Structure formats: structure tokens, C-alpha cells
Image (cartoon, grey):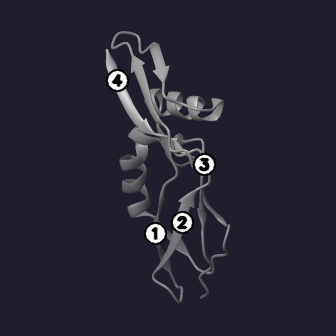
Amino acid sequence: MTVYRFTCVICPLSCSVEVEVEDEGGRVKDIRGFSCPRGKEWALKEALSPRRVVMTVVRVRGGEEPVVSVKTDSPIPKDRIRELMSYLATLEVKAPISVGQVLVDRPLGLETRVVATRSVRR
């Protein structure tokens, strides 16, 4: 049995939530400490399949800035972050770039897009 302990980030109550998961099969045995259904749902997802939005920079060719800040437009599996970061470290995009511009659609087959979070002029 594995017990995951979290401080919920869904609301200002910051509940201390515990999720017990069976080691074989990954079935949730018990969850306790949450105050609302949203906190319960968040803790279950965090224990069974944690996901994160990734923010970094990508090199820019021909721009007034050498890099542009980017982020994924949806969370990706936590265990794929290192792979995505390695891929983005090799990427170079051409200026001009507009804030919100999709720079990569479905990188590495992930269900997300990498978008610019600022503009870069030539």
C-alpha cells in the first residue's frame, strides 16, 4: 500500500489530503482529508496520474531577443516533462513571433500545443 499526502491547491482551505493506493493494480483504497468534491478529484488525479503545465524558453532566429518564453496550453503527464524539455532545447523558431502563437502542435505525440507567451519582433 502506498499513501500519498498532499496539500490541496484547489481552494484557500489547503486541506491535507491522503490517498491510499494499492501497490498491485493501482486501485484507490481510501481517500480522506478533503473538504470539497473538487479537492477530492484533484487529489485522486495527483495520486494516479500527475500532470503539469510546462513553461520554458525556446531559441529564436532573426529576432530582437535570442529566446521566447513558451508554455504548454494544457498539462502533460509529469513523467514526460524531461523528454519534452529535451526536445524544446533543440528547437529554434524564426522571428517574428506573436503572443499566443502555436509554435509546436502535439510535440512528441502529446495532447498539447506549445505556445508563445510573449511577442518577439525581427
Gap in Å between the C-alphas at discs 1 and 2?
Answer: 6 Å
Which label sits in the foreground, 1 or 3?
3
Dot 4: what SS?
A: strand
Q: Quadrant of the C terminus?
A: bottom right
Dot 1: what SS?
A: strand
Quadrant hosting residue 98: bottom right
Residue count near mark 3 (Cα–Cα under 10 Å), binned few <14, some 14–19, many ≥20: some
Q: Are marks 4 and 1 in contact (CB under 8 Å)?
A: no
Q: Total marks drawn?
A: 4
Quadrant hosting residue 95: bottom right
**Residue 1 at x, y = what percent?**
31, 14
Q: Which residue, given by chain and number where applicable, does mark 4 sit on?
A: 3
With 33 as the anchor, is 96 left or right in this view? right
Residue at screen point 40% across, 55% down: 85
Res 57 label: 1
Q: Amino acid at mark 4?
A: Val
